Amino acid sequence: MLGFNEPEFLSQMASAVALRPQIEELVDRLVDEGFDNLYLVGAGGTYAQMWPYERLARQRSTFDVRAVIAAELIAAGEASLGERSVAVFTSASGTTDDTVRAIDYCKAKGVHTIGITGYPDSPVAKNVDTVLLTEPKAWPFDPQMLILMTRLLSRRGEFEGYEKLAAELDKLPQILLEVAKQTEPVAEKFADDHKDTGYYFLIGGGNLWAYAYLYSMCILEEMQWLRTTRVHSAEFFHGSLELLEEDTSVIVFQGEDEARGLTERAANFAKRISKDVTVFDTKDYPLDGISPEFRGLLGPLVHDVATGRVSKHLERVRDHSLELRRYYRVMDY
């Protein structure tokens, strides 16, 4: 596979899954001690990665769980944030400025802060009350967040089958490796066909709306300097559909949760207008070892791995490094 280090991928994914005992111990301690609300704090892609787990809590629990943007949290505040709060922060580098400042902001209010990163000497790791360390560059953070949220809901009696799910997640490194391998030829063809495409229209719903947002902003825009529009599949018919034309390149992220029908409706309409609609669907992957009732929960993770192959092939055909930036972490702002 193009630009793919299989041993490193497996090792990084294994390091994320291996945090399960630490996460369980942490969640159990916090539940036993008692707390009133949970804040999931991120910036850019790490903010988007929090949405599926806020959504999962809203669906199943009466507990107050909120995903918030780090910089806005500092600027606007939250009335419920205080000594009875817990806040989770993720950062691949451990140095994201907005996230580091948000940690300091929360700690000043007496919040118990948790950081997930791959760098023990980073500002995130050093500043939080509890740090959960993976191998360097381990991404995404979905395995850790899924374990954390389902453990919390399980302890509250709001999620059935936690032990079964957690045991199945041990197989994630190999499962996701197969996702990458299966996607490789699809990704190669997609990139070859879209070498000169400058504008993409992305659709996602349910727990994949976050990934449509993430891939649009953090990959196509930030890493490839391409123009995009992104829309939730349930909102597609309230304005954004008017942008479709015959040659509009549409990417649809389809999953297996409650929003599947909404996304299917949007995709079917898009196909009536555009001749360039690509649907990435988690149902196309076996995910051997994952029970049917849990497949929908893995949508963001499956798509992250699958589109990682697309990104590498776009980098190839466009001769545009995924590491190249003009402004982000280059200029002061």
Image: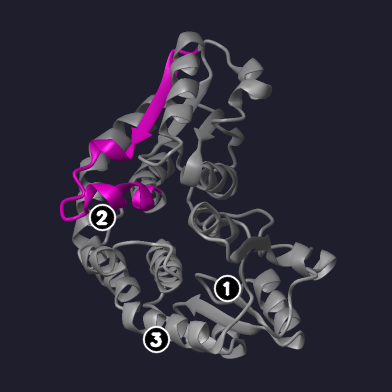
Q: Nearer the viewer, residue 166 or 90?
A: 166
Sequence-wise, the earlier of marks 2 and 1 is 1
Q: Residue at x 75, y 72 (%)?
A: 80
Closer to us: mark 1 or mark 3? 3
Which portion, as a residue range, is magenta? 274-299
Q: Amino acid at mark 2?
A: Leu
Q: Residue at x 34, y 49 (%)?
A: 302
Q: Quick one: 302 or 38, which is closer to the camera? A: 38
Badge 1 or badge 3: first in the primary sequence:
3
Rate crowding at label 2 as few (under 14), some (14 to 19) or many (20 or more) other CA atoms within 10 Å: many
| Secondary element type, mark 1 | strand
Residue in front for this viewpoint, 113 or 116: 113
> Is residue 204 shown left or right of residue 147?
right
Residue 25: assigned label? 3
Give amino acid for label 1: Phe
Task: Compare marks 3 and 2 and give the one earlier in the sequence.
Answer: 3
Q: Estimate the x, y position of residue 181 in percent, counting from the top left.
A: 21, 47
Residue at 48%, 50% (x, y): give it: 321
Q: Are marks 1 and 3 in contact (CB under 8 Å)?
A: no
Membership of 50 in magenta stretch = no
Query: How far apart are the alpha carbons under marks 3 and 2?
Result: 26 Å
43 over 181 or under it: above or below: below
Q: Quadrant of the C terminus?
A: bottom right
Give the alpha-carbon distance from disc 1 to disc 3, as whole Å: 18 Å
| Residue that numbered label 1 is attached to | 89
Residue at point 43% right, 21% down? 277
Q: CA distance from mark 2 to mark 1?
A: 24 Å
Above-or-below relation of 114 to 208: below
Q: Quadrant of residue 261?
A: top left
